[in-house]
Image (spheres, rainbow, N blue to C red):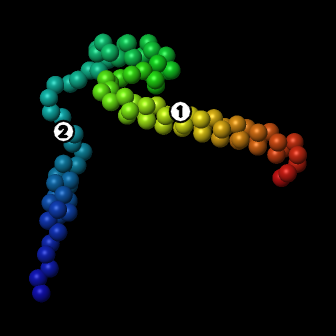
Amino acid sequence: MHKRQDTATSAYKEESSSRKGQIWISGEAHISNEELWIDLYTKKSIWRRVFDVSTTDHNAHVRALQDRVVFTAMLWASCLAVVLTVGSVCIPSASLF
């Protein structure tokens, strides 16, 4: 009975053992600190970074759905934060533990 050798793993093992400790780099070095958009982006406030329109949207319905999803997520996060805050304040004062 012939057992087929798994060529994918055997080839990978040979390749990985011969390349151990080497890093393959192709092309020129890319220094991202020299890009103009990085300075402009870092100067923006966190609010503008999150809610700034980064791409043009051709479909207003998709944009409305995305805005609703973000708003709903923020609403649920706020509700959860309020519940956890009230719980952490009430439990120690009522000696429930």
Give percent across and percent down for residue 23. 22, 39
- Classify mark 2: helix, strand or loop: loop
**Which residue is more in the foreground, 40 or 65?**
65
Q: In the picture, residue 75 is in which quadrant?
A: top right
Q: Which residue is mark 1?
A: 71
Q: 48 or 62: which is nearer to us?
A: 62
Rendered image: mark on residue 24: 2
Identified at 11% across, 82% down, the residue is: 2
Q: Amino acid at mark 1?
A: Phe
Q: Residue 83, position in %: x, y?
A: 71, 41
Mark 1 is surrounded, within 10 Å at the Cα level, by few (under 14), some (14 to 19) or many (20 or more) other residues, namely few
Q: Percent from the top left, x then y, of residue 43?
A: 44, 12
Residue closest to the far front: 61
- Mark 2 or 1 closer to N-term? 2
Up-down relation of residue 41 to residue 77 (above or below): above
The image quarter in which residue 66 lies: top left
